[in-house]
Amino acid sequence: MAKYTIIIEKGERNYSAYCPDLPGVVAAGETEEETTELMKEAIEFHLEGLKEDKMPIPEPTISARCVEVVV
């Protein structure tokens, strides 16, 4: 099992997400939760394809943190 970081962005009408460790793996949904689930499915699908093609699975290298700043 691996943990891949996803970045979720709020748009005007929906949310979109991508995985920096897996370029091209993206998803969009109406809610943050839906977008997260769709990203999980997209990552699993992508990794299955890599396995089928006997290509290496990229190791997760990206991490994210939130920091508080005074504005």
Image (tube, rainbow, N blue to C red):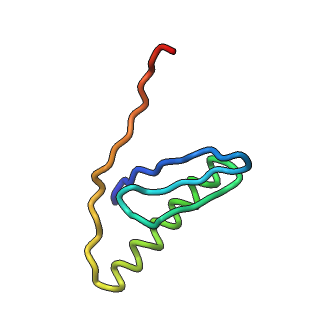
Depth check, front residue: 59 or 68: 68
Q: Quadrant of residue 2?
A: bottom left
- The residue located at (41%, 76%) in the rendering is 48
- Residue most toward the top? 70
Q: Is residue 38 above or below residue 63?
A: below
- Left or right: where 29 falls relative to 42: right
Depth check, front residue: 2 or 70: 70
Query: Which image quarter holds the N terminus?
Result: bottom left
- Left or right: where 47 falls relative to 54: right
- The residue located at (54%, 47%) in the rendering is 8
Picture coordinates of residue 29 (x, y %)?
66, 56
- The residue located at (38%, 63%) in the rendering is 22
- Left or right: where 54 falls relative to 64: left
Q: Is residue 12 above or below residue 60?
A: above
Picture coordinates of residue 19 (x, y %)?
43, 57
- Residue most toward the right? 13
- Residue most toward the front? 71
- Left or right: where 62 falls relative to 10: left
Q: Could you tell me how many numbered marks the image carries?
A: 0
- Residue most toward the bottom? 53
